[in-house]
Image (cartoon, rainbow, N blue to C red):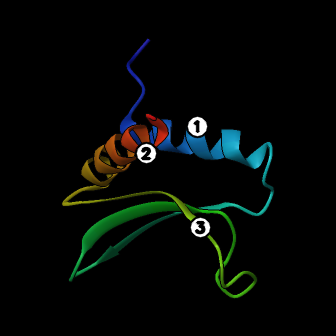
Amino acid sequence: MSEQTNLAKVMAIHAEMLQTNHYCYFELAYTRYTEWMVWICSNAREQDPNRKVLLKGQGSTPEEACIDALNNYEQEQTP
């Protein structure tokens, strides 16, 4: 069996979060200014102006953005 991609790892974190927060959402986007960005938020900004960004990352490829997001997430989870 092949190793799980970083994108799949981020999606697994999102699936786990959905178990307790049905409103959190995942987004992977590309812009010419930021390149690839991935994030998971607690709720949509339109519905909750106090929403929290639970996971975020940026990179030149989707995988790089996910690596950055996973590293940031791990650092935030460590006390």
Say which of marks 1 and 3 sits in front: 3
- Say which quadrant the N terminus sits in: top left
Determine whether 78 is above or below 29 in the image. Answer: above
Q: Is residue 64 left or right of residue 18?
A: left
Mark 1 vs mark 3, CA separation in Å: 19 Å
Q: Which mark is residue 52?
A: 3
Q: Look at 69% across and 88% down and name the residue there.
A: 46
Residue 65 to residue 29: above or below: above
Residue at horizontal 47 percent and vertical 61 percent from the top: 39
Q: Secondary structure at mark 3?
A: loop
- Dot 2: within a 10 Å radius of its alpha carbon, few (fewer than 14), some, or many (20 or more) residues? few
Q: Residue at x 38, y 20 (%)?
A: 3
Q: Position of residue 41 (x, y in %)?
A: 59, 64
Which image quarter: residue 43?
A: bottom right
- Circle nearer the viewer, 2 or 1: 2
Q: At label 2, which amino acid type do we have?
A: Glu
Say which element carries label 2. Answer: helix
The residue wearing badge 2 is 76
Mark 1 vs 3, N-terminal side: 1
Of the two numbered discs 3 and 2 on the same chain, state the one appearing first in sequence.
Answer: 3
Mark 2 vs mark 1: which is more N-terminal? 1
Secondary structure, mark 1, is helix
Provide the residue designation for mark 1.
12
Residue type at tag 3: Lys
